[in-house]
Amino acid sequence: MNIRKYRALPLATLTAIVIATMLMLSVGIAYLGVTSYSKYLDESINDGLPPEAAAAYRILNEGRVPDEASLKTLVEYFDAQAAPADFKIQIAALICGLLSALICAIIGIFLAKRIARPLEDLTIAAEALKSGDFSARVSASSSGTSEVSSLVETFNALATSLERMEERLHFNNMAVAHELRTPLTILQGALQGMLDGVFPLDRKILSDLLLQVEGLGKIVEDLRTLSLAIGQQLVMQRQILDVAEIVENVLSAAKPMLDASRLEVETGLQRARISADPSRLRQAVLALMENASRYAETGGWLRCETERLPDESVVIRVLDRGPGFPEDMEAVAFNPFWRGDPSRSRETGGTGLGLSVVKAIAVAHGGHLELENRQGGGAMVTIHLRPE
């Protein structure tokens, strides 16, 4: 039986086909064995006929009636051979049945191993995954059922996801250490200097240290936001609101920051009501304003738009004339600590968590974050929000 022909069948169907085939094969082998032995036995009995009985048997086959004595001899001979012949046929049926069962069992074991081989590979790969080897994969097998093939695909996707998560975790741990090391070093050095009498205890130094503490608090809050997003607990207080009002309020609050960056702000705010968490939306829009004030300062222009789409989803767009995004924008969207400033300067680069926080908030509202470069220069960031 060719398993390749049935590799896409469900396990229940394939099992039924194998069982039916084995039954038919077993019956066929037993039937052929008993029939062949019966024919051989008949020929042996006929060859052993006494001369008088053989003559009578030949006359009967010719359609004539033999004499009474020859016919009686023939009947007595067949009666004498009947019981031993029946016993031999029964023994032959038993032997053929056992033989056919043995052959079918061998074939069944072979087929079962072919079907179960992907599961053995899955077990080995799962053990490797358990030990921390996230590069473990299972090759697609031509002898698997549809359920096993689906399981292999799911396992490989899971292993790939875990490998990426492990790589991101490693990178994020290093990035967090990098982000925290600078302000902590500044705080430790300044405080130690004050204790040693190197630095005077004045308001200017305390004000600078407070800025470092606020920066640490911002990093911790952004990390907390991402952690809540992973646990699907980011959006907790939905209510019907006008997104245009949210953006307008954020722009008003962020005006000093935008003015400091010498950004001319334009708006195209259309009324767009949707069920959303107002505090999280304000957080996302403010993060985009902070991002624009750092990177779009050279363009001197910023535009904010809100719009309700025909499918009842809502979008928030922020457009600028800055340097735009790099070519590998997909990496930007998934790298929590990406900065537009290659030097990773805190003064221009921030924590690098802004876009990840915005993306997490958009996803928590059933939407997504879209990053594009505008024709003629600049960037466009779009938050898509979907109704519940």
Image: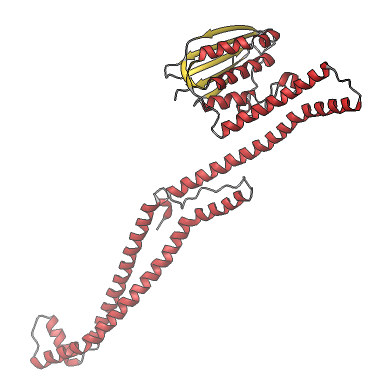
| Between 215 and 302, the one nearer to me in the picture | 215
Residue drawn where x is 46% and y is 49% of the image? 148
Residue drawn where x is 59% and y is 20% of the image? 284
| Between 51 and 125, the one nearer to me in the picture | 125
Q: Please tell me whether residue 110 is drawn above or below residue 182 in the rendered image.
A: below
| Total labels drawn | 0
In the image, taking residue 263 as reference, residue 388 lies left or right, namely: left
Quadrant of the snapshot with the C terminus: top left
In the image, taking residue 33 as reference, residue 102 lies left or right, namely: right
Q: Position of residue 248 (x, y in %)?
A: 56, 10
Q: Can residue 376 be seen at all in this image of the molecule?
A: no
Residue drawn where x is 64% and y is 23% of the image? 354
| Between 110 and 199, the one nearer to me in the picture | 199
Q: Position of residue 99 (x, y in %)?
A: 37, 73
Q: State which quadrant residue 190 falls in.
A: top right
Q: Position of residue 377 (x, y in %)?
A: 63, 12
